[in-house]
Amino acid sequence: MRPIQIAPSLLSADFARLGEEIKAIEPYANMIHIDVMDGHFVPNLTFGAPVIEKLRLWTTLPFDVHLMISPVDPFLEDFANAGANILTVHPEASVHVYRTLQVIKELGCKAGVALNPGTPLGRIEPLLPVVDLILVMTVNPGFGGQAFLESQLPRIEQVRRLIEGSGREILLEVDGGISSITAPLAINAGADVLVAGNAIFNNGGPAHYEESIQALRGKNG
Ligand code: DX5
Ligand code: ZN
């Protein structure tokens, strides 16, 4: 059985207390998922590299930075310097996405590519030789708390087969609408990493973070 990693998404955390929120989930999380939105590529705004640089002081857990910005290339170096460990881009946000992934690796980060619900799988297939993580979106990007799109389950399975066929070590991350109900579906379809915002941060407050994360791993309490 593959070990399942949980990446809490700060999008649903208390933005005025992000450092404390990271400390509160740190003992139970495998990495921290940070959604960067520009109000242009997606219809919402969050934070940029200076905020991530300050958050870097709060934990040694890997920062899994999901870039929903266009253009993305001019900002890669800033995010790498701010302390990102994984930089994930959407192919629609870069004219030359293979080169973008190469640049991310040259900057010392792992390179991720995200697959929107409407993006054909063929878009990521040529990237297998260079990519370290494939993020399958199970909602349309932009907001937390949306319903999990079950229509994406066969695509998670297809991506899992692509990864196995590549012979490379590539993480399969699933992002959007993950809860204790949908987590097993994503895991059975082939996920290695589950991103979750609403199911962790809006589920009774910090006293419940541990139990909320364990529930995503399929454990009680
Ligand atoms: C959506 C973001 C997600 C979001 C998931 O565009 O990419 O990471 O935080 O939130 P939940 O888990 O609430 O669906
Ligand atoms: Zn995300």
Image (cartoon, rainbow, N blue to C red):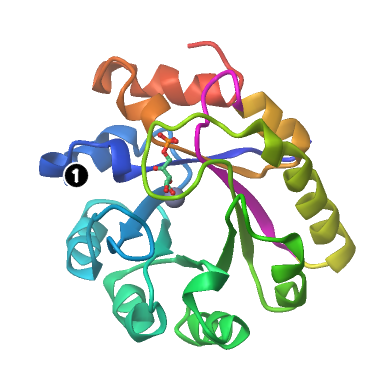
> Secondary structure under badge 1?
helix
Q: Does the magenta portion include 170? A: yes
Q: Tag 1: residue type?
A: Leu
Closer to the camera in the image, 144 or 133: 144
Residue 29 inside the magenta-drawn segment? no
Residue beneath disc 1: 18
- Examine the rendered structure and indicate whether residue 206 appears above or below residue 136: above
Q: Can residue 124 be seen at all in this image of the molecule?
A: no
Front-most of residues 153 and 32: 153
Residue 155, image x, y percentages: 75, 47
Q: Position of residue 4 (x, y in %)?
A: 63, 38
| Prevalent SS, magenta region | loop
**Does 128 sit left or right of 100 as displayed?**
right
Which residues are the magenta region?
169-182
Outermost residue to the left = 16
Q: Residue at x 52, y 67 (%)?
A: 90
